[in-house]
Structure formats: structure tokens, C-alpha cells
Amino acid sequence: MKFLRNIAAAFSLYSRIPVPRFQWKEDDLKYHLVFLPWVGAIIGALEILIVAFADFAYLPDLATVVLLALAPLVVSGGFHLDGFMDVQDALRSYKTREEKLQILKDPHIGAFAVIGLAKLALVWLAALAIVVDSGSFPPLYAVAAIFFGARAVAGVLALATPPARKDGMLVMETSGASRAAIVALIAEAALGFGSIAAFDVTLSVLCAVFAALYVIRYRRKCLREFGGATGDLIGCFVVKCETVLLAVVAAATVWADL
């Protein structure tokens, strides 16, 4: 029962997928981060279905690209994108650590959040266009797999980084977690990126290496700029890690075609 409640808590927090509602207890959040990657698995499966439908219906590449870009937003409800936009405003404020943390709590968006979102959208559309235009299954599968892998390493980051505040959503989510949760998330990351090797070993290695390097770099930035992690910072990481990995897949696809 606790196992199912942890799954329900993960899907309730990090997606718009309907789950039974109940009064959460501390045990219900103890391992819920372990199931965060499975939200990514749903997104990845939807991406594969979109590609299959586009091929069946002879959709134009532009329509396919737009549908692929919308899929994560539909499943997650933009949950992580909200954190991404808040972090853009905080970082570009160039204020003190305490003031940046206050900006993260501000429900309003600023100019830098909008600028950051526009740049993010352009990168996604360009990278997806490259992958779709290739018509090759390995990069298309890699795109689907990065949603699982990025959330797995995000869970590791959340549990391995001290919180920037003594309260808040992230503290609630990670306070009861154990080392077993970190081990499980690392195993899930290996599963996600390793599964790409079934179709392309090079892409698998590239995605795993870039994900590992980026989580190390991002953790240092969190500590330097904010003194630790917050829910917004982890949400921002999910978005940026997905973007980095998507760019890696697109670059590898272009290289393979040369």
C-alpha cells in the first residue's frame, strides 16, 4: 500500500495524470522521488506514439515537431517550466543570495523569464526539427529516453544537495528520503541512458556523460548562487538537462549525417 501511495504522490506532484486523492503522510513521500522518472517514461512513450501517428497520417515535419514539443507540457502541466522561469529571473537579477531566494518565491514573471523561455523554445524546435528530419529511429528513441533519464538525475541532485531554505516544498519532499532512494535513482538513470545503447551505443554514452557532467555543474551553481537547492531549482534543472540532452542528440544526428 505504501508503495502505491508513493507512486500516486509522485504522479500527483509532478504531472497532470489523474491519480486517487488521499491525505498524504510522511511515509508517502519517503520514496516518491524514485517514481519521478516514470513520469518521464510516460512522456517518452507519448513521444514515440506521436512519431508513429505522424508517420501514419503523413503529418508535415513542422506539425510533428510542435506535437513533440507540446507533449512534455501536456503531461507535466508545465510544472518544471515554472521553476525554470523563476530561476531565470533570480539569476539575472544579480542580487544577493537572500534576494534571489525571495525572487524564486515571487509568483510574478519578469522580462528575463520571458526571454529565457523564448530561447528555450527556439532550441527545442531547432533540435527536434533536426531529429525529425533525419527520419532515423535511434535519435528519436534517444529523445524519448532523455525524459526518463533527466528526471532520474534530477532526483539524485535533489537528494544530494542541501536545501537552500529550512522550509519549503523540497524540504518536505526530501526530508524522509534514504540512501536507498539515491541508489534507486542512479540505477534508473543508468537504465534510461543505457536503454539507448540498444539502438546506438554512441548516443547512449554521450547522453550519460553529458547528464553526469551537467548535474555536477548545476549542483555547484546551486550552492554558489543560492546556498543549496529549492523546488524551483530542481524544476529548472529538469528543463535544462532535457534541453542539453536534446541538443546533444541533435548534434550527434547532424554529425552522423555528415
Image (cartoon, helix red, strand yellow):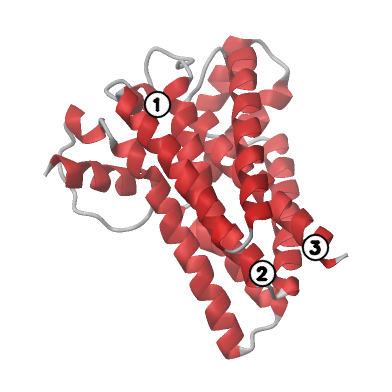
Residue farthest right in this picture: 258
Write down the residue under mark 3. 256
Tell me which label, 2 or 1, sits earlier in the chain.
2
Instruction: Compute the Cα span from label 1 to label 3.
Output: 41 Å
Percent x, y for residue 71? 52, 63
Residue 65 image label: 2
Tell me the distance, in whole angstroms, between the alpha carbons under discs 2 and 1. 33 Å
> Which residue is pictured at 66% across the width and 54% down the height?
203
User: Measuring 51% from the left and 55% from the top, which residue is drawn there?
Assistant: 195
Do the numbered discs 3 and 2 sit on residues whose CB atoms are within 8 Å?
A: no
How packed mark 3 is, by other alpha carbons closer than 10 Å (few <14, some 14-19, many 20 or more), is: few
Name the secondary structure under disc 2.
Answer: helix
- Is 117 on the left-hand or right-hand side of 171? right
Circle 2 crowding by C-alpha within 10 Å: few under 14, some 14–19, many from 20: many
Q: Residue at x 61, y 39 (%)?
A: 211
Q: Nearer the viewer, residue 206 or 100?
A: 206
Point out the residue furthest to the left here.
1
Q: Regarding mark 1 in the picture, which secondary structure is present there?
A: helix
Q: Element under label 3?
A: helix
| Residue 220 or residue 206, whichever sits in front | 206
Q: Earlier in the sequence, mark 1 or mark 3?
A: 1
Residue 143: horizontal and vertical position, in percent?
Answer: 60, 59
The reply to whether residue 78 is in sight is no
**Residue lying at 80% horizontally and 62% vertically, measured from the top left:** 256
Amino acid type for the residue under numbered disc 2:
Val
Left or right of residue 54: residue 255:
right
Q: On screen, 119 above or below 41?
A: above
**Whole-Å distance between the Cαs marked 3 and 2?**
20 Å
Please give left or right for residue 199 compared with residue 60 in the image.
left
Tell me how many marks there are: 3
Q: Nearer the viewer, mark 3 or mark 2?
A: 3
Which residue carries the number 1 mark?
A: 170
